[in-house]
Amino acid sequence: MITPDEALRIILENVKALPEEEAPLSKANDRVLAQDLVARENLPSFDNSAMDGFAVRSEDLTGAGKASPVGLPVQDIFIAGTTKESGLRSRHAIKIMTGAPVPVGADAIAIKETTRADSDAFVEINHQPDPGDHIRRAGEDVRSGDLLLKKGVTLRPYEIALLAAQGLVTLPVIRQPRIKIFATGDELVDPSQDISFGKIRNSNGPSIVAGLNRWGVEPTDSILVRDNADELEGALRIGLMKNDVLIISGGVSIGDYDHTKAVLEKIGFQILFWKVAIKPGKPLLFAKFMQAGQPKYAFGLPGNPVSALVCLEEFVRVALETLKGHKPHYPSYHLKGHVLNSYVKPVNRQQYIFCQVQRENDEFLLSIIRPQGSAMMGMASRANSLAVAPIGVSHIQTGDVLSFRWLK
Amino acid sequence: MITPDEALRIILENVKALPEEEAPLSKANDRVLAQDLVARENLPSFDNSAMDGFAVRSEDLTGAGKASPVGLPVQDIFIAGTTKESGLRSRHAIKIMTGAPVPVGADAIAIKETTRADSDAFVEINHQPDPGDHIRRAGEDVRSGDLLLKKGVTLRPYEIALLAAQGLVTLPVIRQPRIKIFATGDELVDPSQDISFGKIRNSNGPSIVAGLNRWGVEPTDSILVRDNADELEGALRIGLMKNDVLIISGGVSIGDYDHTKAVLEKIGFQILFWKVAIKPGKPLLFAKFMQAGQPKYAFGLPGNPVSALVCLEEFVRVALETLKGHKPHYPSYHLKGHVLNSYVKPVNRQQYIFCQVQRENDEFLLSIIRPQGSAMMGMASRANSLAVAPIGVSHIQTGDVLSFRWLK
């Protein structure tokens, strides 16, 4: 039995980002750039007006003020998208819209709010702009040839905008992990079916899929597998053909019908850890297998539905973030609260405790939900947070401080 | 011009959760339950073993200990999923796996770790369990007829597990918002195209889609519309047929070619606000239209790409969360940091300032990126955070404290 920190360390040591692939911009959202990108063009690509107003020579407006407006004939109108390249004549103005190119000869924009135009032919301007006013210069944001985005950045909406503006519509990004979920157990039936005595519905398949989808892993499916070593082996071998990660719930403990570990070993997986000093989730297993130079990973999760989800979020998630090229989101328990009720836990395991946290003034107060158990989904559904009680502690008393995170 | 708080208030006053619909469990992840649900069955539905071991009558093991193990003939094996209903004979044990039904007559499980069985026929047990030990009682988690989940809860993986376990495979949930995005402007060309002088690529369409997808709004498409009132009207009328929210970028300012406001009014929208005291994003517009008893909403976003995304996250997001039935995620600026460089802002507007924040010891230090502009996507891509500087402040000095949030 290893500590949870040791388990996380082993995961991080063994999991690497997936290889890159070309993806269209429309599929690049939230993914990690696999190469440095260089700007192909200046942004903006031409000098343009930052405001609606009139393009002018600032010297033509010397002395202009509210009491002494200067009148100029309006030579032309430049709207955004115009391809006109005509120049501004001396002592004239060109009406201009935001985003339109600045006419040759103009050195400032007199913004609409400082002008009065009773006709399309003539404008009075009551303010002298400084040279450069309200002009966005070509390349002021990005210069052609400069580093546009660094390898390793996550593509947020701002980066998507930047890439679209540069015309970069296919991109080198880290491939998304492909994941297959196996819910094992002779007792399991599909959630759509009635249950007879002794049977339960498969809740791990749907809930693990939901968890993965929330973390931006493409929709994944789950299948049911009987407690039979041959059937499990066949299912895992098929799963390995197309997937990077196999997640197997159930069959990972020490019972006579627990085949997960033996079958993974038979296939060629190296067991990197089995059994972690946590509650719930002790039988958690992590394994790796090199297939044609490409690592494949397997997680054996406990069959109990609450244990499975705790292990998924605490351990599997770290592996998935790493595969996607992110710096892993280590489970974060940076909030602290005072416990309102006592609880007894195993001294030699770190326990994840389901709580209802409320905020009172500037303090968080944690009600530990009692009883709690690794199969109690109703219990977990009443929790808004998960507190963590370390190895070495056996009794939690009213008033003790525990670290917690929100269960979102 | 209204304050940003006033704008958020108007959005919250006018936007209501969408109507409910039936959705399959596989599409229910992260959605909001539209009705109270009552438990149809006990969970667990039968008494079952929480551990691998032997089902026993505790009285048969009186005095059992390490030095005085009690031997019992093994009558049968119950594996998880068994449908056997046979009873435990007096002074016998039944081998049992986690999740298997507890045989009638047994009142405790002697866990495997306290037993020794050299054959399938006989077991020695070195510990006397208390009645009830390691038995999960039918209904201990959820009782048939009890409230299972409350209307308004967000369905997390734990709730998905619970619903699957109850066999609830279609659910009443709040409908997802349908959104159409219109990027307007004669200057715009598709990101896949080369640009000629005066033209720019459409970055708002892809970046707004990316933003919405990150917040769990189903993939949405964007279309390009020219700066032409008739064309815009036609596009918006078609968009209204199928969508709840129209998001229009560009054409929302006071220029002669800004048609958004007039076209929305012509269609029948009531303008709820136009122009907010923010930078970037001042021309932001919000409108509502009742169509066959169902409210439709429109947001006019500035055409500048950085302004559009700031308005999307600060204002549109609040509306979308509300439509989805969530308590809205008000933009949260609860972190605070010290500014490392000075900055001048308009005193009468709240400014969202792009920063690079680093943590030093227990303090956040904010480098304001300079220059910053509403069209500078390269600038925004270098920021990891957005600070907010309130109305009334014109000069930010080194050492000042600003609130900020991470730009994820």
Image: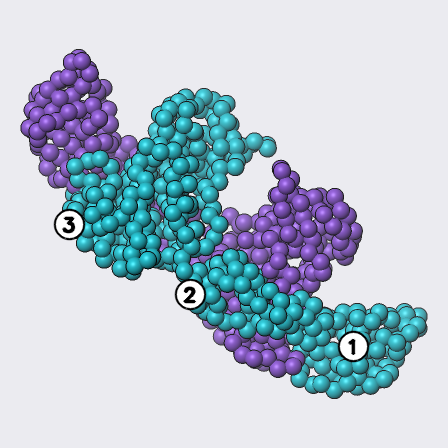
Chain colours: A cyan, B purple
- What chain does badge 1 belong to? A
Helix, strand or loop at label 2? It is: strand
Residue density around tag 2, few if under 14, some if 14–19, many if 20 or more, within 10 Å: some
Label 1 near label 3: C-beta < 8 Å? Answer: no
Q: Earlier in the sequence, mark 1 or mark 2?
A: 2
Q: Residue at x 60, y 64 (%)?
A: A147
Q: Residue B294, labelled with which disc?
A: none
Residue B197 appears in view: yes
Q: CA distance from mark 3 to mark 1?
A: 79 Å
Q: Amino acid type of disc 3? A: Asp
Q: Amino acid at mark 2?
A: Glu
The residue that label 2 is drawn on is A21
Q: Earlier in the sequence, mark 3 or mark 2?
A: 2
Q: Is residue B174 above or below residue A77?
A: above
Quarter where residue A162 is shown: bottom right
Labels 3 & 2 near each other (Cβ < 8 A): no
Chain containing the residue with disc 2:
A
In the image: residue A289, left or right of residue A131: left
Chain letter belonging to callout 3: A
- Which residue is depicted at the point 39% across and 22% down? A394
Q: Quadrant of the N terminus of chain A?
A: top left
Q: Is residue B185 above or below residue B355?
A: below
Amino acid type at image mark 1: Phe
Q: Nearer the viewer, mark 3 or mark 1?
A: 3
Q: Secondary structure at mark 3?
A: helix
Q: Nearer the viewer, residue B292 or A130?
A: A130
Residue under pointer 1: A54
Q: Which residue is mark 3?
A: A230
Number of residues whose C-alpha sits closer than 10 Å to that of mark 1, classed few (under 14), some (14–19) or many (20 or more): many
**Quarter of the view holding residue B346:** bottom right
x, y (%) of residue B392?
Answer: 77, 50
